[in-house]
Image: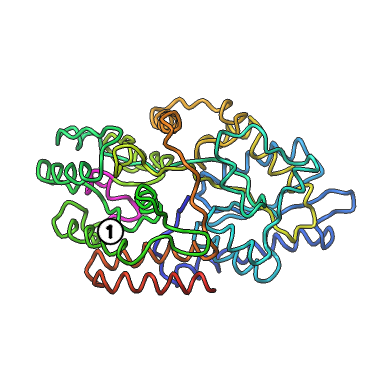
Amino acid sequence: MPENGKIERRTILRAAGATAAPLALATTATACGGNDGTAADGTVTIRYAWWGADERAKRINRSIALFEKKYPKIKVKTDFQDYVAFWEKFQTQAAGGNPPDVFQDAVGFLRKYDKRGVLLDLKSQVDAGNLSMDNFRQGVTKVGEVDGKLLGVPVGSNTMALVIDKKVYAKAGVEPVAGWTWDDYFKALKKIHDTTGVPGDTGYFGIMYLYDLYLRQNGKAFFDTDGLGFDRADLTEWWTDAYNRVKAGIITDPKRVEQDKPKSSLSAGHGASEFTWDNFTVRYTAEGDSDYGLAPIPTTDGKQTGQYLASLLLSASSRTSHPKEVAQFIDFMVHDPGVGKIMGYDRGILASTEQYDAFKPTDTVNKEIAQYEEDTAKAGLLGTITPHPAGADTVESAFLRIGGDMSTGKTKVGDAVSQFFSEAQAAFEA
């Protein structure tokens, strides 16, 4: 599940610097009990890091309180930042041999850090009985399995969706239906623009995970095992069509999108729809003053959407001195019903059946998110996630950045395609 974007280097450095002091304090506190985080009375301290906003931190801290009540001999030191600052800091820690014992992770980083020997294969802890991989919703555990290893355990799942402004769609007389094609979708965007004056889409062309679905619908994929699963001609067609639609006004002007940040142009009223992960729908309700809902992904053949379940994961460091306690912590955080009630859908639809059954959403938005995933699964649309090779995180950022330059005319389509393939190759070889 991507939560990154285009952020200037000075912002990253400032964010990373702001967290240096708390980390130093946490390290000092841990060291007081010994180099391995064990106190004289046998109490073990493990470090847990994640990215997210303050609300996620509040929920996680409440969950940790439940864990420490059940396991009084295990203490958890916490650390969190926004997405970009988190990975900037994590990369430094991993390079220095001091990553957190357990941390929030995503599929795009698994092979990268496994290749560097950073990640613990959790299968040994499953075999030892410290971590259960039973009672998960169908399909979600595959996300953390790489090359026969268990490198991450899902805490929540989601899938790509189209979020729409229901009022604008209704005013234009457009009704999304399952099985509609890309041609249907683009005709709808034009109708919305011509009828209401609102661009139909906020800008789909730089979303790696959406392009992956489109490629999967056409027998390809964004990634294969070692690199890209598509060629220059594929991307040239995708970006050329997008550029023409931006110029025609049916896609929100990218300059307007930048001006609207940190709000989405959808919730700002400058676009009628936006592709994103289904659980992000709560964002639009909080930011905007219209009614927002989930619509089906357009298709190539009227049937297959290319969708799969992605997930935020919990991974562990191969350098941890406390693999048993880390495994017990992960097990608790993904299975305990009380944690499920606290976390809700903050990190996606709850992955384990114990937590999924324990949390009953009462608000309209979360009910619709849950229903969307249930309907997608029942329709038999979900496939297996495309493997992500080492360097996928860098490639995703390049796709977003270069696609943005293309859309504004800063870079011609042909040059943008060449630049992307060059940067992708460099990322895979790093």
Q: Nearer the viewer, residue 66 or 244?
A: 244
Q: Is residue 166 above or below residue 236?
A: above
Classify residue 328 as left or right of residue 265.
right
Residue placed furthest toward the front: 219
Q: Position of residue 288 (x, y in %)?
A: 30, 41
Residue 420: image quadrant is: bottom left
The answer to whether residue 26 of the structure is visible from this angle is yes
Q: Residue at x 18, y 56 (%)?
A: 245
Considering depth in this image, is 15 or 326 the residue closer to the camera? 326
The segment highlighted magenta reads: 260-273
Specify the quadrant of the image occupied by residue 242: bottom left
Q: Position of residue 387 (x, y in %)?
A: 52, 54
Residue 192 on image: x %, y %: 15, 42
Q: Is residue 194 left or right of residue 57?
A: left
Residue at image coords 62%, 43%: 61
Instruction: Write the residue at 19% across / 37% down.
Output: 168
Please, what secondary structure does the residue beneath circle 1 have?
helix
> In the image as oriented, which residue stretches furthest toward the left?
194
- Name the chief secondary structure element in magenta: loop
Q: Which percent across, then down, holds residue 414? A: 26, 72
Height in image: 64 above or below 5? above
Residue 48 visible? The answer is: no
Is 196 inside the magenta-drawn segment?
Answer: no
Q: Which residue is at 53% across, 73% downward?
A: 429
Does residue 344 lie above or below 45 as drawn? Answer: above
Q: Quadrant of the C terminus?
A: bottom right
Magenta segment: does it hold 263? yes
Q: Label 1 sits on what residue type?
A: Trp
Residue picked out by circle 1 = 238
